[in-house]
Image (cartoon, rainbow, N blue to C red):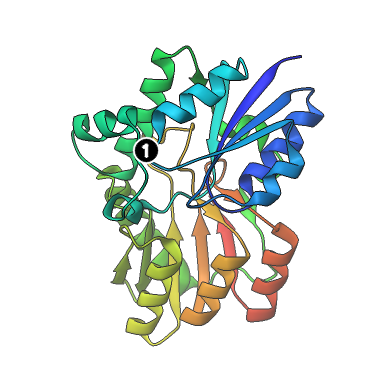
Amino acid sequence: MERLGIIAGGGPLPVVAAREARMQGFKVVAVALEEAASADLANEVDAFCWVGAGQLGRLIAALKREKVTDAVMLGKIPLDLIFSRVKTDLDGLLFYLKLKDRRGDTILAGVGDRLMQEGITLHDCRRYLSSVVLRKGLLTARTPSSSEQQDISFGRELARTIAQLRIGQTVVVKRRTVLAIEAIEGTDAAIRRGGQLGNGGVVVVKVGRPDQDMRFDLPVIGSETMVALEDAGATALALDADHTLMLDREKVVAAANRLGLAIVAD
């Protein structure tokens, strides 16, 4: 039986992928980050172990012990961990010291390169997430108004610029004014900050990078995002089709329709 390793952060994505991979006939091995992942994942896989976020050597050893040569990296990994006291083994410490910078995608790409040296290939995570990949089109009952569409076009250009600079992937705008740009705080915090500054009525645009590495860091929208959008008084959300994952789609769309929020993917 083919084996798939899942390096798991927080949120439901690792569980979604584990279920889909097992349906495809894989034996699934999960290595879960103690600082982020849910213990519920253990019920969805064939083998499971915990590692600390800085324990790269232990992570590699766990995958090799289970004879894993193909893996995906999924789930939320809080980037502010780099400013926290995390348990680090020797491999993790050496890896950290060699990084050219400490941006999130630099760290993730570096982990991918290190795994490749050990004969473990990280794959495009969408292969095991087909049920949550967002396709092009209008998702909600209401379409964006003409003024919202202007803000979407304005925001999309800006979002692509900051994404290319590897700063963040989300902007909050109103009347073609930038209210918030996502950085290390994450999407939901940026949305709330923009809503507060704009006193509601804001438009949120979230994009993938032009050079998006499909092995990790895809934009994700879910029920928690809807709570942030409601808190911010947002009226429209624009996303990138085929480069965005939407969790709990029925709940998200129902909440958006209740709020009169327009969601569109292009």
How packed mark 1 is, by other alpha carbons closer than 10 Å (few <14, some 14-19, many 20 or more), is few
Kindly identify which residue carries mark 1.
210
- Give the structural element (helix, strand or loop) at label 1: loop
Q: Is residue 157 above or below residue 251?
A: above
In the image, residue 71 sits, relative to residue 221, either above or below, namely above
Q: Does 92 sit left or right of 2 as displayed? A: left
On the question of residue 135 being in view, the answer is: no
35 or 198: nearer the eye?
A: 35
* Outermost bottom residue: 199
Total marks in image? 1
Instruction: In this rendered view, identify the residue nearer to me: 139 or 54.
Output: 54
Q: Label 1 sits on what residue type?
A: Pro
- Closest to the observer, 190 or 81: 81
Residue 253 locus on image (x, y percent) = 69, 65
In the image: residue 141, left or right of residue 111: right
Quadrant containing the N terminus is: top right
Picture quadrant where residue 187 is located:
bottom left
Residue 202 location, x and y as percent?
43, 77
The residue that appears at 74% across and 30% down in the rendered structure is: 46
Residue at the location (72% across, 66% down)? 251
Any part of residue 213 in sight: yes
Which picture quadrant has residue 106? top left
Q: Residue at x 42, y 32 (%)?
A: 213
What x and y, as percent, mark residue 51? 50, 39
Q: Does residue 55 sit above or below 185 in this rendering?
A: above
Residue 31 left/right relative to 92: right
Residue 15 lies, in percent from the top left, at 69, 44
